[in-house]
Amino acid sequence: MSLLRTAFRPSVLSARVRQYATEAPQKKSNLVPMTLAVGGLGGLAFYVWSTRTGASSEPLPSALNSDQFVSFKVKKVVPYNHNSSTFIFELPPKTSSKLPVASCVVVQAEDPEALKDKKGNPVVRPYTPISAAENTGEIAFLIKRYETGVMSKHFHTLKPGDSLKIKGPIPKFPYKENEFDEVALIGGGSGITPLYQVITHALSSPSNTTKFKLLFSNVTEEDILMREDLDALAKKHPKTLEVVYLLDKPKDDWKGPKGFISSDVIKKYVSPATSERTMVMVCGPPGQVAAIAGKKDGFKQGEIGGVLKELGYTSDQVFKF
Ligand SMILES: Cc1cc2nc3c(=O)[nH]c(=O)nc-3n(C[C@H](O)[C@H](O)[C@H](O)COP(=O)(O)OP(=O)(O)OC[C@H]3O[C@@H](n4cnc5c(N)ncnc54)[C@H](O)[C@@H]3O)c2cc1C
C-alpha cells in the first residue's frame, strides 16, 4: 500500500468497510454475541453501526425517485487516494436507496444550467453507490476524478452542505441468485463500482453457489479502488470469489499479471464460451469496454465485439454496464 493511501485511510478504512460494505445486514439478535466476541470499543462501534444502518428486517421506503431528480446534501467527503474520494450524501431519516441489483443512479448538478454539454444540455452521468441498498439515512459514492472530465470534476468540488441531484434506480442487469455457474466480472478503474454491487449482493446470501471471477485492471497499484474490501471478501468467500488485479504500469515488485486484459488472460481465468451458464459482465473506460466486448451503443448494449467475440462468447453471455 502506498504512503498516500496509508496516510488517508487507516481510520477511514475499517469504518468504511463496516459502513458501506453492501453485504446484507445481519439481524440484531446475531449481533449481540458478535459484539461480545469482537469486544471493546470496536465491537461497540460495530453494533452501533449495525443498528444505525437499519439492521432490522423492517423494509424502509426509498429516498430516490426514478422519474425525477431529487436534491441531496453532501454530509461528508472522505479522500480515498490521489484522485478518488468517497462522497456521502444525506437521505431523509428512515429512508434508504433501495437500489435493486444491478442498478445505478444518474446525477446532475444542483443547478443544471451551470453544467452543460456542448449541445447545451445539462450534463448527466451514471454512478453506482458503494453503500448498501439498505443503509439508512445515507448513500455513498466513490468517485474518481478525471482531469478532462465534466461531472467527476464537479463531484470533486462538492463540500459538506452542497447539493447534487440524483435520479434512480436506473435498472442495469436483473441479477438472479444462482442463475449462472460462473460470473466473470471484467473491470477497469472506477468501473469497479457496478461489479462491486453485484459481488457484495450475491455473496451476502448464504445460498449463493455462483463462482465470481473478478479481473480488475488499473494503471498502477495506487489506482486500485476498493482493494481492501475486495480482498476481505475473497478471503471470506474463497470458493466463490477470485480476484485478479492487473496493472498496466506496475512497479518492479508487482507479482501479479501485467498489461491489458487480453484473450490469454481471459482464457486463463474465465470458463470458455462453450461452458453453460457462464456470464461475463464488463465495466470500464469506453476504450476498454470496446476492446474487450465491443463498443456500447449509447444506453444500448451494442454488438458483441473485441476479445470476447474472438473467444466465441455471444451477446447473451455478455453484459456491458
Ligand atoms: C453503470 C456505471 C456506473 C458508474 N459508476 C461510477 C462510480 O461509482 N464512480 C466513478 O467515479 N465513475 C463511475 N462511472 C463512470 C461515470 O459515469 C463517468 O463516466 C465518469 O465519472 C467520467 O465522467 P466525466 O463527466 O467526468 O467525464 P467525461 O466528460 O464524460 O469524459 C472525459 C474523459 O473521461 C473519459 N471517460 C469517460 N467515461 C469514462 C469512464 N467510465 N471511465 C474512464 N474514463 C472515462 C473520456 O474518454 C474522456 O476522455 C460509472 C459508469 C457507469 C456506466
Image (spheres, helix red, strand yellow):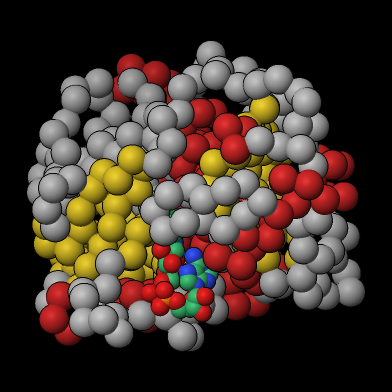
Q: Name above or below for residue 110 compared with residue 91.
A: below
Give percent across and percent down for residue 16: 43, 53
Please name the residue shown 33% across and 65% down the image.
Answer: 125
In the rendered view of the protein, which quadrant contains the N terminus?
Answer: bottom right
Number of on-image labels: 0
Give percent across and percent down for residue 118: 30, 84
Res. 285 image quadrant: bottom right
Where in the image, quadrant-wise, is ligand 1 located? bottom left
Q: Nearer the viewer, residue 145 or 122?
A: 122
Please name the residue shown 37% across and 29% down the image.
Answer: 25
Please name the residue shown 84% across and 42% down the image.
Answer: 267
Res. 61 image quadrant: top left
Res. 79 image quadrant: bottom left
Q: Is 203 displayed left or right of 253 in the figure?
A: left
Q: Is residue 39 visible?
A: no
Give percent across and percent down for residue 161: 15, 72
Q: Is 152 displayed left or right of 182 in the figure?
A: left
Q: Is residue 65 visible?
A: yes
Please name the residue shown 67% across and 27% down the image.
Answer: 278
Give percent across and percent down for residue 259: 81, 66
Q: Is 153 displayed left or right of 270 in the figure?
A: left
Q: Is 308 displayed left or right of 170 in the figure?
A: right
- In the displayed orientation, state which residue is furthest to the top: 207
- In the displayed orientation, state which residue is furthest to the front: 303
